[in-house]
Image (cartoon, helix red, strand yellow):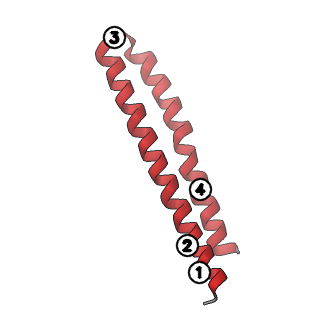
Amino acid sequence: MEMAQALVYLAGGILMGLGAIGSSLGIGNLSGKYLEGVARQPELQPMLMTQLFISLALVDALPIISVGISLYMIFAL
């Protein structure tokens, strides 16, 4: 295996890992703030849950995109 191909594999792995780490931190932060908001004002729980799911979908898009790009790098380049 040549050096350039090894670097592409390494870059793909780092891209997947950093995407997963960033997403997990974002999801943890969002969930914690949601629980704090519901604990303070339980009557707002349905509205907060809707906003939580929208935000989780946006945060979850990043690792999905990074996995797609890294798989492209690994298998197509």
Q: Are marks 3 and 2 in contact (CB under 8 Å)?
A: no
Question: Which quadrant of the figure contains the C terminus?
Answer: bottom right
| Marking on residue 39 | none
Mark 4: secondary structure: helix
Mark 1 vs mark 4, CA separation in Å: 19 Å
Mark 1 vs mark 2, CA separation in Å: 6 Å
- Left or right, 62 with respect to 37, comes to right
For marks 2 and 4, give the one nearer the viewer: 2
Mark 2: secondary structure: helix
Q: Say which label, 1 or 4, has the lower sequence index.
A: 1
Q: Are marks 1 and 4 in contact (CB under 8 Å)?
A: no
For marks 3 and 1, give the one nearer the viewer: 1
**Callout 4, which amino acid?**
Ser
Crowdedness near tag 1: few (<14), some (14–19) or many (≥20) residues, C-alpha within 10 Å: few
Mark 2 vs mark 4, CA separation in Å: 14 Å
- Which residue is denoted by mark 1 in the rendering? 6
Crowdedness near tag 3: few (<14), some (14–19) or many (≥20) residues, C-alpha within 10 Å: few
**Residue that lies at the very extreme toward the right in this rendered image:** 77
Q: Say which label, 3 or 4, has the lower sequence index.
A: 3
Residue depicted at 63% across the width and 85% down the height: 3
Name the one closer to the observer, 60 or 6. 6
Q: Say which label, 3 or 1, has the lower sequence index.
A: 1
- Which residue is denoted by mark 4 in the rendering? 66
**Callout 3, which amino acid?**
Gln
- Which residue is denoted by mark 2 in the rendering? 10
Mark 3 vs mark 4, CA separation in Å: 36 Å
Residue depicted at 53% across the width and 30% down the height: 54
Mark 3: secondary structure: loop
- Which residue is denoted by mark 3 in the rendering? 41
Q: Are marks 1 and 2 in contact (CB under 8 Å)?
A: yes
